[in-house]
Image (spheres, rainbow, N blue to C red):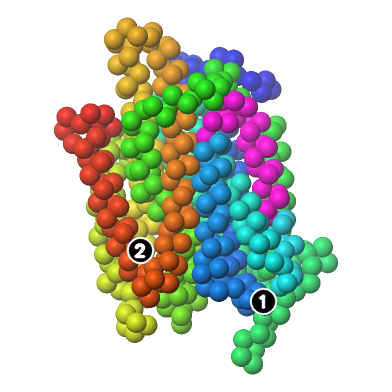
Amino acid sequence: MSYILHDWRPEDKNFWQQTGRKIAKRNLWISIPALLLAFAVWQVWSVAVVNLPNIGFKYSENQLFWLAALPALSGATLRIFYSFMVPVFGGRRWTALSTASLLLPAAGLGFAVQNPDTSYITMMILALLCGFGGGNFSSSMANISFFFPKAEKGTALGLNAGLGNLGVSVVQFVVPLIITAGVFGALGGEAQTWVKGDATKQMWLQNAGFVWVPFIIISALAAWFGMNDIASAKASFKDQAIIFTRKHNWIMCVLYLGTFGSFIGFAAGFPLLIKSQFPAVDPVKYAFLGPLVGALVRPLGGWLSDKIKSGAAITQIVFIGMIVAVCGVLAFLPTDGQGGSFWGFFACFMALFALTGLGNGSTFMQVPVIFLNMHQRFAEQGLVDAEQARLDATKEGAAVIGFTAAFAAYGGFFIPKSYGTSIAVTGSVNAALIAFIVFYVLCGALNWWYYARKGAEAKS
């Protein structure tokens, strides 16, 4: 098999039907498990931190929130660079190498948690290294966007991101189960003892990291031998940097922060938020359901946007719904540790996760449409020919998809950290939630003005 595709014309219907679709789908289905593993490694600390105090690690509540938030901080920062890597190195090579890089934080976590005397600084470094998984999202989405025609980008990107996002739910479901048994035998290390009152039980928290290692190796090899690089997608960083002069790049950054930033932030902070607000509830029994709902709904957001040919309309509904859902969360929280309704709180958060999933899909459908329409106008004005306009739109759209994903990933840091800061300053999480409402109002206004209303500047 030729790893480099020298002739790639997805908008040519004959080429797409006869040759392109099969190749594109193969690359998509290899990309999805690699991205799922990236999300699992990225979010493993959201579950691990809940168990650290149980096995002898003496960390404060704020320190635990920091460990849950740091992977998002580093992942978001790495995404800025990863956004531009596919046109520089090629999608096949970069997917294989970036997937293999996940071995370092996965194995590192497995060794570190076996010793309760491991320094907090070491734990912070390992949490930051888990950001490799977060960075992979930007390069993965940029890569897949090159393979599909405009009419199918929303669905393809929704599948890649939605099924990839399942890694968040998978890690929050698998880790509580895998740490209850010594599945790796002597190779996995000794069990830790959890003492709670008069009861004791054994735990293998190191499995939270080790369990992903064999799958990472398999996925990296599959990417190296099964994916393709597209010759026409080659571009230097300088070529791609033009997106920083595009107004719609920055507006879409804000909108995607409201959707994906909320999804990853809520996912990272949900277990600790449940534990702090409803101490009688075991968070590991419920936390995985939110990311699961959000990930499964995401392809629907892309599909609906393709179907009605308007991602902006779906995005508008999403932000209105998120405002209502956060108001519901506020209504069901306990006051000074009294009252409140866990099931009401939980239902509102499930609605939030579902809405963020829809918005994740719809916003990523908007980006290629906005930039293709913009470059087609350049062609109509005689500034470039039609084929060059298509190539420029594809390259810029891919770079914007990657960069907006980088910008939005900071939500994974700020949301858990805002919970901790709000509790430390005011004694409750209410201030953080009110700030979210204000932000969603801003997002809804931007989306309506620029993309959704009749006569909008960039109807999408």
- Provide residue 73's location: percent of width, then percent of height: 52, 51
- Residue under pointer 2: 432
- What residue lies at 65% left-to-right and 66% top-to-bottom? 120
In the image, residue 20 lies at what x, y percent?
A: 52, 22
Viewed as shown, does residue 312 lie left or right of 45? left
Residue 87 in the magenta stretch? The answer is yes
x%, y% of residue 121?
66, 62
Does residue 172 appear in the picture of this structure?
Answer: no
Instruction: Reply above or below: 46 against 194.
Output: above
Q: Secondary structure at mark 2?
A: helix
The answer to which image quadrant residue 277 occupies is bottom left
Q: CA distance from mark 2 to mark 1?
A: 30 Å
Q: Which residue is mark 1?
A: 55
In the rendering, at what x and y percent does residue 184 appear? 77, 63
Please tell me whether mark 1 sits on a helix, a strand or a loop: helix
- The residue positioned farthest toward the right in the image shown: 186
Q: Quadrant of residue 333?
A: bottom left
Q: Describe residue 332's horizontal placement relative to residue 3 as left or right.
A: left
Q: Nearer the viewer, residue 2 or 22?
A: 2
Looking at the rendered image, the quarter that the N terminus falls into is top right
Q: Mark 2 and 1 residues: CB-CB less than 8 Å, in contact?
A: no
**Vertically, is 167 above or below 455?**
below
Task: Left or right? Give the position of 422 relative to 182.
Answer: left
Q: Residue at x 64, y 51 (%)?
A: 129
Say if 51 sits above or below 110 in the image.
Answer: below
Locate residue 220 relative to residue 404 in the image: left or right. Answer: right
Q: Residues within 10 Å of mark 2 (few under 14, many from 20)?
A: many
Whether 280 is among the magenta residues is: no
The amino acid type, in three-letter code, at marker 2 is Ala
**Res 153 visible:** yes
Which residues, given as a range, are shown in magenta? 83-106
Q: What residue type is disc 1 on?
A: Ile
